[in-house]
Image: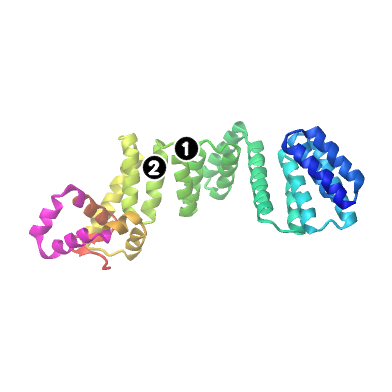
Amino acid sequence: IREKADKVKDEGNALYKKKEFEKAIEKYDEAISIDGTHMSYHTNKAAVYMTQKKFPEAIDAANKALEVGKSNGGGFALMAKAYARLGSIHTKMKNYDEAIKAYEDANLEDYNKKTDKELKKVRRLKAKAEAEAYLDPKVALEAKERGNVLFKQSKFVDALKEYTEAIKRDPTVAAYYQNRSTAYSKLMDWGNSMKDAEKALELDPKYVKAWARKGKINHFLKKYHKALECYQEGLKIDPNDVLCRQGYNLTSNVINQNMREGKVDEEQARRALQDPEIASIFNDPTIRSVLQDMGSNPEAAQKHMANPEIASKIQKLMQAGLLTFGGPQQKQ
């Protein structure tokens, strides 16, 4: 009986490949009439209905396949296949909760990397759909205004929650990230403050306030060379910006004072060498030779420093706190 039913099923498969869908379904129904104990004929019907975008019929066929499989010992692999088919149908219908449940059931029956990949994909689709459904620019603006009021009252944690709500409601506005970055900095959470400042600049590269904020964070982290770069970027956009001008002057003064005093700041030097650009300069054989000449052969050092490229690199090392007027702060 099974052999006869499978032969009819194969005829249905051939018709399916030719896109003769109605005829294929007739063959699968014929196979079912011959052997009603095999679930794969129903699973194949579900595939045809899904291709035709007849999703309710596809769900019915997949559920029937599972019913037959449970009653007749369909086997783990075939049960998993039917659940996965059900998951793909629900995904097409954007019934993400049902799709997730079906894929999870499929993996419980018979774990499969492809099924697991689809499960993760549906979870992402669900999260995206929920986030998009939550969008509301008007509500976002209201949340931001509430955050501003709380921020002025020094209620930074509460302000943070409102700015986060504003971002969830409208993640396209750079100012919301900038505001949250400022709130994070008040709580001395420099990592999240930096992430939000960078996100604000990703959305609006000419956002001078965000450049100033990023510069200030770098200053507090003693990444003075990075702070100067941020302030310079802000001043390129607005040469009269007070925050960037003040930040630049303050950072420059700290750098110059440390150099004059020959002050060794191990924390600053360590963080500077975590910067790939600074580490590359510091370990450059040519620059190492220049640094040696600076201490032992002033005339040769002056000759090296006449090269604009070398002079620029030496200046970056000074800004990073790796050099003082007395020479290198660290030895490699």
Q: Residue at x 68, y 50 (%)?
A: 119
Q: Amino acid at mark 1?
A: Leu
| Amino acid found under the numbered disc labelled 2 | Trp
Secondary structure character of the magenta stretch overall: helix
Q: Which residues are magenta?
A: 282-310
Q: Nearer the viewer, residue 312 or 55?
A: 55
Q: Residues within 10 Å of mark 2 (few under 14, many from 20)?
A: many
Q: Residues within 10 Å of mark 1 (few under 14, many from 20)?
A: some
Question: Where is residue 109, by image quadrant?
Answer: bottom right
What residue lies at 27% left-to-right and 65% top-to-bottom?
264
Dot 2 corresponds to which residue?
A: 211
Local secondary structure at mark 2? helix
The mark lying in front, picked from 2 and 1, is 1
Q: Position of residue 46 (x, y in %)?
A: 79, 41
Which residue is at a point 90% across and 51% down the rendered structure image? Answer: 1
Q: CA distance from mark 2 to mark 1?
A: 12 Å
Q: Of all residues shown, which one is farthest toward the left? A: 299
Q: Which residue is mark 1?
A: 203
Judge whether 94 appears above or below 73 on screen.
above
Task: Please say whether residue 260 is one of the residues in the magenta stretch.
Answer: no
**x, y percent for residue 212:** 38, 43
x then y, percent, for residue 229: 32, 46
330 on left or right of 213? left
The image's colour scheme reads rainbow
Could you tell me if the residues under marks 2 and 1 are in contact, i.e. CB atoms within 8 Å? no
